[in-house]
Image (spheres, rainbow, N blue to C red):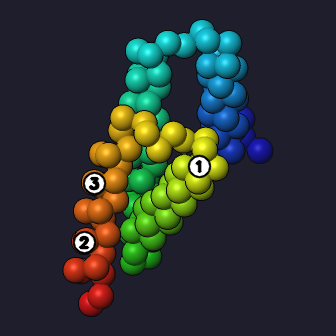
Amino acid sequence: MSTHGPRAQISAMRASLQTIEAQLSRGDIGGEGLEDLKMGVDDLRLRIWAIMAAASSGESGALERFRIRRAIDVCANIGDEIVSGAIDPGHPEIEELRAAAQRLATALASRGRA
């Protein structure tokens, strides 16, 4: 097996994330570092979606399905965390989340039934 193939690259990314997680738990990464990390992860996600779209160009809806499944996971997890108390329902950004969820619900209700 190649040491530079996709599996090796994924293993390296996982190892990097474990290192970052350890740094976070020690408090070695502050607010600005976290924002940089978030932007990097967002960029990586977009690039992976582009790669998946190119790879699945013959599969109609593969990228769309992936994005919808990811949204389902995120929404379910956040809902569970609010119920369990892991996320404070009084957090300052909850109103923005509620508004985004309402826009999504409205869009699904108005256009989701074709």
Picture quarter with the N terminus: top right
Q: How many marks?
A: 3
Residue carrying label 2: 107
Q: Is any atom of residue 58 visible in this view?
A: no
Number of the label disc, if any, that sits on residue 81: 1
- Against 15, residue 100 (above or below) is below
Residue 89 place in picture, x, y as percent? 47, 44
Q: Residue visible at 30% across and 75% down? A: 108
**Placement of the C terminus among the 4 image quadrants:** bottom left
Q: What's under tag 1, amino acid-wise?
A: Glu
Mark sitting on residue 33: none
Q: Is residue 53 left or right of residue 11?
A: left
- The percent position of residue 73, horizontal first and vertical second, equals 54, 59
Residue 99: which numbered mark, if any?
A: 3
* Foreground label between 1 and 2: 1
Which class describes the residues within 10 Å of circle 3: few (<14), some (14-19), or many (20+)?
few
* Side of 104 where 38 appears, left or right: right
Describe the element under mark 3 as helix, strand or loop.
Answer: helix
Tell whether 97 sits left or right of 16: left
Q: Which of 49/102 is in front?
A: 102
Q: On the image, which quarter does residue 86 sit in?
A: top right
Give the residue type that dot 3 points to: Ala
Of helix, strand and loop, which one carries label 2? helix
Residue that lies at the very extreme toward the front in this rendered image: 90
- Alpha carbon of mark 1 to alpha carbon of mark 3: how far? 18 Å
C-alpha separation, residue under disc 2 versus residue under disc 3: 12 Å
Determine contact: label 1, label 3, CB under 8 Å: no
> Observer-nearest residue: 91 or 36?
91
Q: Which quarter of the picture shows residue 55?
A: bottom left
**Label 2 amino acid?**
Ala
